Amino acid sequence: MITEIRMIAFSPEALVEAVRLFGQSNHDRFFTQVREAYVQPGSPPVVVAEVCGDDSDATDTIEFTPAETAAFLILLCRRQRIPLPHQAEKSLRLVGGDLCLVVTRQSFPCRSPDEAEMPELEPAADLESPDGG
């Protein structure tokens, strides 16, 4: 088995943009302005944002679930044309103060030589070795 692991780190500015996009696209949690977004350490880390609507100075504090956080990070990746494998496992991790989306994909199951279908090779009788023999 081959395992591919990628980490995509989001700066505080990228996190604010991801939360803003989520608010615009989610009818249950609609907001247009994100004043601040930060990450609380934990396993998994928790994103908290100060948000408000169009014509309001009043802010609300929203704590996002891991599923919502993954959703808005994936949404931002799509908007930025960062490819993400659909079948990959995705998790959240805090690394050096930045929130990271960890993408893990397992593929290409390795087979033992006995199981692998090896192509038939032609006899090497008329081939010379590199040393001329």
Image: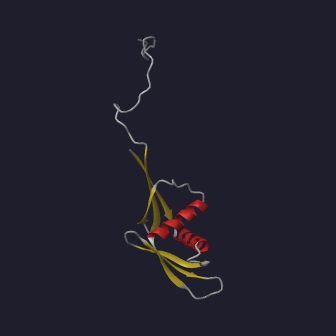
Callout count: 0
- Does residue 72 sit above or below 130 in this rendering? below
Residue found at the far front of this picture: 28
- Does residue 1 sit above or below 115 in this rendering? below
> Which quadrant would residue 95 be assigned to in this image?
bottom left
Residue at 52% across / 65% down in the picture? 73
Residue found at the far right of this picture: 55
Percent from the top left, x then y, of residue 11?
52, 67
- Does residue 86 sit above or below 53 in this rendering? above
Say which quadrant the N terminus sits in.
Answer: top left
Q: How is the image coloured?
A: secondary structure
Residue at 59% across / 79% down in the picture? 31
Q: In the image shown, does 17 or 108 lie closer to the viewer?
A: 108
Percent from the top left, x then y, of residue 61?
50, 83
Residue at 52% across / 71% down in the picture? 12
- Does residue 55 sit above or below 94 in this rendering? below
In the image, taking residue 84 as reference, residue 118 lies left or right, namely left
Percent from the top left, x then y, of residue 108?
43, 42
In the image, taking residue 33 as reference, residue 90 lies left or right, namely left
Residue at 56% across / 61% down in the picture? 77
In the image, taking residue 21 as reference, residue 65 lies left or right, namely left
Percent from the top left, x then y, of residue 7?
46, 58
> Which quadrant would residue 92 be assigned to in this image?
bottom left
Say which quadrant the C terminus sits in.
Answer: top left
